[in-house]
Amino acid sequence: MSVATAASANGKTPVLEVSGLCTHYGRIQALFGIDLQVAQGELVALVGANGAGKTTLLRTISGLQPASAGTIRFLGEDLASVAAERRVRKGIVQVPEGRQVFGPMSVEDNLRLGAYTRSPGEVEDGLQRMYAMFPVLKERRRLAAGTLSGGQQQMLAIARALMARPRLLLLDEPSMGLAPLLIEEVFETVRMLREELITIFLVEQNAHKALSVADRGYVIETGRIVLGDSGPALLGNAQVQAAYLGV
């Protein structure tokens, strides 16, 4: 039984299906036959060490990095010939590593940029939803995004992505560079999104935090998926504990 089969979506409708995916940077192969699934309403975590291929996988799913072999299917559609911009319009939205908010622009203008694919009415509705979900952003909506704390910038980056009304939210290392208290804030936000039944694929180096909130998870090492199971099962796995949890 393959890792992907062992960690299947338990009969739920698959939103994302990755099969045999390979990616190269020139002659250097970065991903080796990746198989995984994310089902409707699930939070699936991908954990692994720095340089294991986590961000490369997200970039390939979102269309920023070309695949050299294998398939990516989104809601049953093969994405091989679909450009990155069209993937956003179809509902795949990524929160980038390092937040990458537009510092000189206001918080509200950052949010509006996230909704560039939506109608004017949807933009206004989205702003009200985000301000209800993230009250601190409403309080600071006129301030330059660069003046926010790291945790607040991460919330802004997530809210900006949600403005596009994603059908699949890709979260790339949301805890990177944050102090422990801010990491707690960010993962509280992730838990809130999970309760909203937003379909999430979370890539994270902090394995304990990621697997604690995940329905299912995968472990990637040097471009290969080596384990797949439920979040609690991976937290209790001796191999994961020794390699990533310091147990």
Image (cartoon, rainbow, N blue to C red):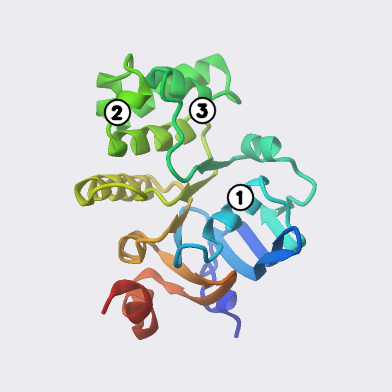
Q: CA distance from mark 1 to mark 3?
A: 18 Å
Residue 1 in picture, x, y percent from top left: 60, 85
**Quick one: label 2, few (<14), some, or many (20+) residues within 10 Å?**
some
Secondary structure of the residue carrying numbered label 1: helix
Q: CA distance from mark 2 to mark 1?
A: 26 Å
Residue at x 31% of width, y 79% of height:
236
Q: Name the amino acid, label 2.
A: Leu
**Quick one: label 1, few (<14), some, or many (20+) residues within 10 Å?**
some
Residue 174 in picture, x, y percent from top left: 39, 48
Q: CA distance from mark 2 to mark 3?
A: 18 Å
Which residue lies under the disc numbered 3?
114
Q: Name the amino acid, label 3.
A: Gly
Q: Name the amino acid, label 1.
A: Arg
Secondary structure of the residue carrying numbered label 3: helix
Residue 237 in the image: above or below residue 166 = below
Residue 100 in picture, x, y percent from top left: 46, 35
**Position of residue 110 in the picture relative to residue 210 (left or right):** right
Residue 111 in the image: above or below residue 23 = above
Residue at x 43% of width, y 18% of height:
105
Image depth: mark 1 or mark 3 in front: 1
Image depth: mark 2 or mark 3 in front: 2
Disc number at residue 148?
2
**Quick one: label 3, few (<14), some, or many (20+) residues within 10 Å?**
many
Residue 21 quadrant: bottom right
**Position of residue 63 in the picture relative to residue 212 (left or right):** right
Which residue lies under the disc numbered 1?
59
Residue 4 in the image: above or below residue 103 = below
Secondary structure of the residue carrying numbered label 2: loop
Could you tell which of marks 2 and 1 lies nearer the N-terminus? 1
* Farthest left residue in view: 181
Could you tell which of marks 1 and 3 lies nearer the N-terminus? 1
* Farthest front residue in view: 27
